[in-house]
Image (cartoon, rainbow, N blue to C red):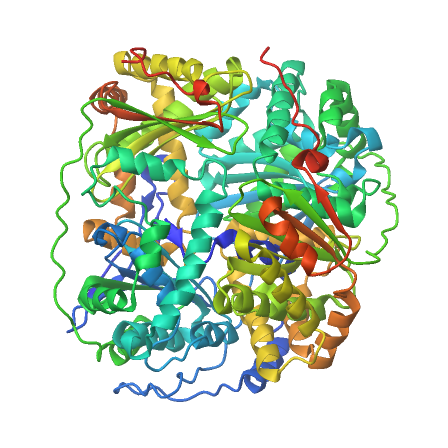
């Protein structure tokens, strides 16, 4: 299947658009509707069944409001907090056990530990080895996975309602009683080392690794791949995993998020049975080094001989999630590169045909995450594409026309209910609430805050966060074909690298079992 | 108009596991110009999805114009008689909408996910390009999207590891005059050749109401929605009927071995067979067989190749179902130091095994349970690719019944272990398949050798 716009191209910025559920405050929502009507210039008109007037787009009635059931809070007897949102349309349940630990807690010599620990949770737990556990989950038609991000680890269960009892027991086994067996570690280690080998094939992986390292260096965990490196992966022992689990997997370092066809009454005793023996503990607090901004513009060209496209990443340090500028940044980025009609996509794709899609994102994290503008462009136009990127990064510093501003704000605000259809989507939204300790009524605030952003706000945050003179420019492409053109642009000092400079030599794993 | 009498779900109170009945209630009507319309109410969020399938895909392309159906799909967004260039996306975004489209060998689908107040905007936009696309067409628009699509080909195929393998498989599975022989993305040469005149004739031939079906799902009032559909689509002329497609027989009389070199570190093996078409007897059997072979850690191939022997990095198997005929594929990536011949030998052993002895009851039940749970997941989203509106259109197109969910699930539940053994014996033939080796550049010796092993 071949599609008009690659989903992935625009999926990343969706995850960066923070959206929350809350009890829908009717009074506030009415205000919100009025404001929208004024902004969008849309009015209610009666409907006529007649030959359509195609001279202008039809007038629309007022936008609907999303009414979500309330978030219900309770604690188990051991103190484990539970957030529950009922959703009864389909007999499914999503449970995300969220732990406040991620790759940022990796010790210096052990990068990849959080990620590996999460992965190993499902490689045998309770009385079941890896194969027995997988068989039990598959037989239920459920899915159970665990993965670590930079600041959180999520053990996620998705199950048909009628298999819930058995599935919850497996979730508890995986989170509380992992086996961390040596032979499973050895097998997983080879798989991960092979993944590092395969990164050498992937222009996107190469560009991303170099981009993060250039922005954050190797002293800050944001600059290091979450999977770890060859040296750390080779060093891990089952003791490392057990120690990590013992240090961070406590009931007071976790929150259980439940979404689906259940009620507090129907599920409380099941959760109590599964999780109440989980003890509390003291998890060390996280100390991260400060982050310094990019100080000048430099260009890094990684040679990928023969590549038909160049992967371009341009960026700098962005903003933390809890910045007061959050909503203004969302609107500004939507205009710059966060939607199909955004300037970067219109320019590089629609106007010039240099790419299948160009976009920009702010990755919001507890500390300032990266701002990134990027695209995969045809090799022969790499230099021309860079010129257009720089043009748009400069252009967003200028006042934004009202029509563009309104469109971006409506796009963010009115599209919001789309994020609340599947139980997994909703659980992810609630996860953000937990991670950043946001209030339950966050959503009402979200819509109003988006609509309150002004053109002056957009200009202010553009100037504050997007300085085209202080960016790292990463290009992974065919050096022989593109170097001269890139150099002639005089964007800044040009560093040329090999793939091995970026990723290290591909690990040699050996064929022994 | 037909109204379904089913409630959203029938769940018997006690033994839910045995009695899950899936239903997506709908109403259906046909406009005088031939446009079939399917409506489904779901008020769980105040959003809806407008989803149009045009029953034309790359399989209808003329020689020398591969990739045209998909290029045309792109051009559909560049404005129509009453929608100037760029406004399609601008107006939708300003109303809080998203949209996308995709082309396969058999159909082209378009959708808009929008807040429920914006229904009429989406109907205006879709009806305008169905009725008045050519009023706004120009050679420059064709050129613009030609470059975009060429970059799509570079990004999704040429610059992606193993990205050319699927193209090579279809070229070798199907004879050159079969609609599935060439890739939907097309060749660079043919994309260059596509002209404004091609756009005109393709539109007139295939983009007619009688060759399309429109599904609207979500927060709608069906009676009002019907009136709005009539209002916006009734002035679109019916056009001429599209003759049925008549593909030649595809048959592989022997094993074909192909080798591709790619910029990859590890060799990968593809084995592909021609199998029964979507929803025909054998199709569901092969879905389940794929799960038993390579779905999950306990599947036969995963367990042996990845878990026990640890000579492969990954393995997958699937029945790629299509209306005019399917293919069954097994794909495996070698670990460093291991050859594709080594992998193929194990795969052959497992195929031989399942041909001689049926899978266990637990293996079958585990696979059926996963498919059954998958049906529930498919009822969660209203719009987008694979959302309810898209599925209603898919089932309508394939079976004539938009609400085919329960019948579809019943296919899997009706099978026993002997059915799976039999389907393997009938279709996973050693002497009629394509074996493709993708190897690192300059390392053709890592491919499976042409020889007698495996025959």
Q: How many marks overall?
A: 0
> In screen coordinates, is B159 left or right of A447?
left
> In screen coordinates, is A321 left or right of B118?
right
Residue A186, image quadrant: top right
Task: Using the image, determine if residue A273 lies above or below residue A39.
Answer: above
Depth order, front residue of A150/B455 = B455
Position in image of residue B92 (x %, y %)? 46, 73
Position in image of residue A140 (x %, y %)? 45, 31
> In screen coordinates, is A211 left or right of A281?
left
On-image quarter of the C terminus of chain A: top right
Residue A311 seen anywhere in this rendered image of the structure:
yes
Which residue lies at the image location 40% right of the left edge and 14% below the top edge? Answer: B346
Which residue lies at the image location 18% right of the left edge and 35% below the top edge? Answer: B250
Depth order, front residue of A481/A66 = A481
Task: Using the image, determine if residue B287 lies above or below residue B298.
Answer: below
Position in image of residue A204 (x %, y %)? 59, 44
Position in image of residue B106 (x %, y %)? 25, 51
> In screen coordinates, is A8 left or right of B393?
right
Which residue lies at the image location 63% right of the left edge and 56% below the top edge? Answer: A485
Residue A4 seen anywhere in this rendered image of the structure:
no
Task: Using the image, determine if residue B190 lies above or below residue A248.
Answer: below
């Amino acid at each position: 299947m071949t599609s008009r716009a690659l989903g992935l191209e625009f999926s990343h910025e969706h995850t960066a658009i923070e959206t929350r559920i809350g009890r829908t405050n009717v009074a506030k929502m009415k205000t919100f509707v009025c404001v929208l009507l004024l902004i969008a210039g849309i009015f209610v008109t009666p409907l006529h069944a007649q030959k359509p007037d195609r001279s202008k787009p039809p007038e629309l009635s007022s936008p609907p409001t999303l009414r979500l059931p309330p978030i219900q809070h309770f604690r188990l007897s051991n103190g484990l907090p539970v957030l529950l949102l009922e959703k009864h349309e389909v007999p499914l349940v999503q449970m995300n056990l969220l732990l406040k630990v991620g790759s940022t807690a990796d010790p210096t010599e052990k990068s990849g530990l959080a990620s590996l620990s999460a992965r190993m949770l499902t490689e045998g737990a309770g009385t079941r080895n890896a194969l027995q556990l997988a068989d039990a989950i598959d037989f239920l038609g459920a899915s159970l996975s665990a993965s670590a991000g930079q600041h959180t680890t999520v053990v996620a269960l998705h199950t048909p309602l009628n298999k819930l009892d058995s599935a919850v027991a497996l979730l508890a086994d995986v989170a509380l009683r992992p086996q961390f067996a040596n032979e499973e570690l050895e097998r997983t280690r080879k798989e991960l080392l092979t993944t590092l080998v395969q990164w050498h094939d992937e222009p996107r992986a190469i560009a991303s690794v170099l981009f993060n390292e250039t922005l954050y260096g190797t002293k800050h965990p944001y600059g290091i791949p979450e999977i770890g490196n060859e040296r750390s992966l080779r060093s891990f022992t089952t003791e490392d995993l057990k120690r990590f689990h013992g240090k961070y997997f406590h009931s007071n370092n976790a929150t259980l998020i439940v979404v689906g066809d259940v009620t507090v009454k129907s599920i409380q005793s099941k959760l109590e049975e599964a999780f109440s023996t989980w003890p509390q503990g003291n998890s060390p607090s996280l100390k991260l080094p400060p982050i310094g901004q990019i100080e000048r513009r430099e260009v890094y060209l990684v040679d990928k001989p023969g590549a038909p496209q160049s992967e371009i990443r341009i960026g700098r340090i962005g903003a933390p999630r809890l910045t007061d500028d959050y909503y203004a940044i969302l609107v500004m980025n939507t205009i710059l590169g966060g939607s199909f009609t955004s300037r970067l996509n219109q320019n590089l794709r629609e106007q010039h045909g240099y790419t299948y899609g160009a976009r920009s994102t702010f990755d919001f994290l507890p500390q300032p995450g990266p701002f990134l503008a990027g695209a995969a462009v045809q090799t022969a136009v790499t230099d021309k594409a860079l010129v257009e990127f720089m043009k748009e990064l400069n252009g967003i510093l200028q006042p934004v026309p009202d029509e563009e501003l309104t469109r971006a704000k409506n796009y963010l605000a009115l599209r919001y209910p789309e994020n609340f259809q599947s139980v997994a989507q909703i659980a992810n939204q609630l996860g953000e609430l937990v991670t950043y300790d946001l209030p339950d009524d966050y959503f009402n605030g979200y819509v109003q805050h988006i609509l309150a952003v002004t053109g002056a706000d957009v200009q202010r945050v553009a100037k504050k966060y997007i300085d085209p003179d202080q960016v790292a420019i990463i290009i992974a492409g065919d050096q022989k074909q593109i170097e001269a053109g890139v150099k002639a642009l005089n964007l800044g000092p040009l560093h040329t690298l090999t793939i091995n400079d970026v990723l290290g030599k591909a690990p040699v794993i050996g064929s022994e079992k | 108009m037909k109204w379904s009498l089913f409630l959203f779900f029938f769940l018997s109170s006690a033994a839910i596991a045995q009695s899950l009945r899936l239903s997506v209630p709908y109403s259906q009507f046909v406009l005088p110009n031939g446009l079939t319309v399917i409506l489904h109410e779901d008020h769980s969020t105040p959003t809806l999805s407008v989803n149009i399938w045009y029953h034309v895909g790359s399989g209808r392309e003329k020689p020398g114009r591969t990739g045209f159906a998909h290029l045309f799909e792109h051009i559909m967004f560049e404005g129509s008689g009453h929608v100037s260039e760029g406004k399609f996306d601008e107006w939708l975004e300003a109303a809080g909408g998203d949209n996308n489209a995709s082309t396969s060998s058999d159909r082209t689908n378009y959708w808009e996910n929008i807040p429920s107040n914006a229904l009429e905007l989406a109907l205006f936009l879709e009806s305008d390009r169905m009725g008045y696309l050519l009023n706004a067409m120009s050679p420059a628009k064709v050129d613009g999207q030609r470059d975009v699509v060429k970059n799509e080909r570079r990004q999704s195929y040429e610059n992606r590891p193993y990205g050319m393998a699927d193209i090579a498989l279809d070229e070798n599975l199907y004879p050159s005059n079969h609609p599935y022989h060439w890739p939907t993305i097309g060749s660079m040469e043919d994309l260059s050749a596509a002209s404004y005149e091609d756009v005109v004739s393709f539109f007139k031939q295939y983009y007619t109401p009688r060759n399309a079906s429109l599904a609207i799902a979500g927060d709608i009032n069906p009676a009002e929605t019907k009136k709005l559909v009539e209002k916006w689509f009734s002035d679109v002329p019916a056009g001429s009927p599209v003759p049925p497609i008549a593909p030649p027989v595809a048959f592989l009389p022997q094993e074909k071995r192909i080798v591709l070199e790619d910029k990859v570190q590890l060799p990968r093996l593809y084995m592909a067979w021609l199998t029964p078409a979507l929803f025909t007897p054998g199709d569901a059997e092969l879905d389940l067989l794929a799960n038993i072979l390579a779905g999950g850690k306990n599947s036969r191939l995963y367990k042996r190749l990845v878990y026990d022997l640890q000579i492969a990095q990954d393995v997958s198997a699937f029945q790629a179902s299509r209306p005019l005929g399917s293919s069954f594929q097994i794909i495996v990536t070698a670990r460093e130091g291991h050859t594709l011949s080594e992998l193929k030998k194990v795969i052959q052993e497992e195929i031989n095994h399942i041909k001689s002895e049926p899978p266990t009851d637990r293996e079958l039940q585990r696979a059926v349970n996963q498919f059954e749970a998958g049906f529930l997941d498919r009822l969660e989203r209203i719009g987008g690719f694979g959302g309810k509106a898209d599925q209603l259109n898919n089932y309508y197109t394939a079976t004539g019944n938009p609400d085919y969910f329960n019948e579809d699930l019943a296919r899997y539940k009706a099978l026993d272990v002997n059915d799976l053994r039999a389907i393997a014996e009938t279709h996973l033939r050693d002497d009629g398949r394509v074996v493709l080796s993708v190897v690192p550049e300059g390392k053709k010796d890592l491919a499976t050798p042409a020889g007698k092993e495996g025959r």
